Image (cartoon, rainbow, N blue to C red):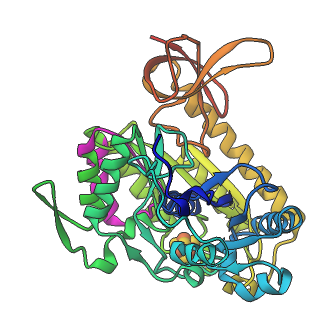
Amino acid sequence: MTKLPQTLASKTPGKIGFISLGCAKALVDSEHILTQLSEEGYVLNADYDSADIIVINTCGFIENAVKESMDTINEALARNGQVIVTGCLGGKKDFIKDEFPEVLAVTGPHATHEVLDAIHQHLPPLPNPLINLIPPGGIKLTPRHYAYIKISEGCNHRCKFCIIPSLRGDLVSRPIDDILNEATKLKAAGVKELLIISQDTSAYGLDLKYRPAIWQGQSYKSDINDLCRALGELGLWIRLHYLYPYPHVDKIIPLMAEGKILPYLDIPLQHASAKILKAMRRPANAENSLARIKSWREICPEIKIRSTFIVGYPGETEDDFQTLLDFLQQARLDRVGCFTYSTIDGAVANALPDPVAESLKQERQQQLMEVQAAISAEKLEAMIGKELQVLVDETVVDEAGDNYIIGRSYGEAPEVDGEIICDYQNSIQPGDFINVKIINADEHDLFAQII
Ligand code: SF4
C-alpha cells in the first residue's frame, strides 16, 4: 500500500462551519468562498461545535436581517469561539468589532480573498491537497438542478433607502465570456435552470462600455441583450432577476417570445407614486412602467412579471398609498412581495421627515397584500386547463403518507414565488422535466396532473 507523505499523513483537513444569510447575491459569494476553500483542501463541517472555524456571511439590508446576523454571530461565538464575519454587515467593521471584539476577522461583502487570508492566518491549509473533489460548476448551495449566476457587483444608483452602493461600491460587471464560461460549466454539472442576478441586471456592461468579446466563435457585446442572446443558446432555462424597466430591456422580450429565455421578469418597482419614487431617488416612473408592461405583454402574452414594493416610506400619504393600489389594479402583476419601510444604519432616507407610524405601515402592507392576493388568485385560476413544462424540485411524502411532486414552470422562481404541486410517479426525480396539465389553483400555488 502506498504511504502518505509524512507532512500530509500527520495533518487532517481544516473543518469550516459556514453560515450563509441574506439574498441570492450573498449566496453566490458564499459559493465562491466555499469553492475556493474546497480547492485548498478544507472540509465543510455541519455543526458549530466540532468546526475549527465558523465563517458567517451576514446580511445588513434591513433591521430584521441585521438582528438575525448579530444573533448568529453571538451564537457561533458562544458555541465555538473561532468566528470570521464577512458579507454586507461585515462592511461595518467597527460596529461588529465593538459588539464582538473576540471575532477573529471582519471583511465586507464580495471579499473572497480577504476571507481566505483570514482563514489561512488562523487555520493554515494543507500543504498540498491530494485530491481535487470540486465539481465542474464549483460548490453550490442550491439543489443540483438550478444555480444563481452573478453577472455584476455593486450599483450606480443611489436609492435613498439602500446602503448597497456604500457597502459594495459602483457597478463592476464581469466580462461576458467569463459569465458564459461559468454558465457552460454549470450546464456540464447538471444545472437545468440559471437564475441571473446582480443589483441591477439591466445595467450590465455599462462600466465595460459594452466591450465586445468573442465566445465560441461569435462576437457578443457586454450588454444584457447580447448576454441573454448568448445564454439562450445553451438550451437551459434562463431566468432574469432585478431588472429595471429601461427602454433597452424591451429588446429582451422578443427573446422570451421566441422561447430562448424564460418569459419571466423580476422588476423591483418599489412604489408607484411619483412623489414617493422621487423621494426614494428611484430610477423609474410608474406611468412609463405601465406602458412598458403593456407593450411587453403585446409582444409576449405569456410573460409573468414579479415585483416588490415598499410601503410606509417617510412622507407616504393615503393618496400615495392609493396610487400604489391603483397601479397594482392596472398592472395586474403575477407575483408581488411587499415590505414595510425600515431604517438602515447609514441610509440617506433615515433623515427624511414625516415618518409613517409602524401600525399604519403594517396596515398598508396587509391591505396591499390582500389586493394583490385577489389579483394573483384570478391570474392563477386563468392557468387552469393549460399545459406546462415543469422542472421538478422535490418529491415529497407528507405526514398522511401521501406522495406528491413539487415543481415550477417558467412562471415560478425558486424560493420567492409559488409552486406547482403534481400527482406522483415514482420514476420522477428532482431535476427532471415533466409535462403537466393545471387542474386547480389557489392564491399562491397551482395543482397539476402529469400528462
Ligand atoms: S438600484 Fe437602488 S435599491 Fe437597488 S442596489 Fe442600487 S441603490 Fe440599492
Residue 175 relative to residue 57: left or right: left
In front of the other: 85 or 23: 85
Residue at position x 28%, y 58% in the image: 227
156 shown above or below 299: below
145 shown above or below 382: below
Residue at position x 10%, y 56% in the image: 217
Is 246 magenta? The answer is yes
Which portion, as a residue range, is magenta?
233-256
In front of the other: 175 or 16: 16
Residue 345 rendering spot, x and y as whole percentages: 75, 82
Residue 446 rendering spot, x and y as whole percentages: 59, 26
Residue 361 rendering spot, x and y as whole percentages: 81, 63
Where is residue 404, by image quadrant?
A: top right
Image quadrant occupied by the C terminus: top left
Residue 84 rendering spot, x and y as whole percentages: 70, 72
Residue at position x 82%, y 73% in the image: 356
